[in-house]
Amino acid sequence: MVAPSSSALEPVAPQEPVNHDDGQWEVRKELRRKAVETFKQEERYQSFAADAARYRSLTPDHEDRSFSKRAWETEMISWKSVWRW
C-alpha cells in the first residue's frame, strides 16, 4: 500500500468569489463591453442585423459579475458561433 502524499493531506484554501475586486472588475467589464461591441461591428453580425432582434437575448451581459474569465470566454465563443455562416 502506498502512503498518501503530503500535499493530499494539506487543507485546500477557499477560493475567492469571482470578480470580487472592484478595480479589476471595472477593467474586465470594460474589456467585455468592447468585445461585444467589436463583434457587433463585424460583417457577419451586420449582415443579419434584421434577424438580430431574435438573438439579442443571447448577447452575453458584460456586466454580469458571476462569469469567471474562462466562463465569459466560453460564453463569447458560444454567442459568436451563432453568427458563423
Image (cartoon, rainbow, N blue to C red):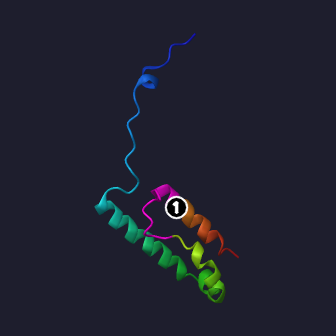
Residue at figure coordinates x 53%, y 70% from the top left: 60
Residue at figure coordinates x 55%, y 74% from the top left: 59
* Residue type beneath disc 1: Glu
Q: Which residues are magenta?
A: 61-73
Q: Is residue 22 magenta?
A: no
Residue at figure coordinates x 62%, y 78% from the top left: 55
Q: Residues within 10 Å of mark 1 (few under 14, many from 20)?
A: few
* Quadrant assignment for the N terminus: top right
Q: Is residue 16 above or below residue 39?
A: above
- Horizontal and vertical percent for residue 9? 43, 22
Q: Residue furthest top?
A: 1
Q: In the figure, residue 25 lies in which quadrant?
A: bottom left
* Quadrant assignment for the C terminus: bottom right
- Horizontal and vertical percent for residue 70? 50, 56
Q: In the figure, residue 18 lies in which quadrant?
A: bottom left
> Is residue 32 rendered to the left or right of residue 47?
left
Classified by dominant secondary structure, the portion drawn in magenta counts as loop
> Is residue 32 rendered to the left or right of residue 20?
right
Judging by the rendered image, the residue that carries numbered circle 1 is 73
Residue nearest the viewer, comparing 42 with 36: 36
Q: In the figure, residue 46 lies in which quadrant?
A: bottom right
- Horizontal and vertical percent for residue 40? 54, 80
Q: Is residue 65 above or below residue 43?
A: above
Provide the secondary structure element on which disc 1 rests. Answer: helix
Residue at figure coordinates x 58%, y 75% from the top left: 57
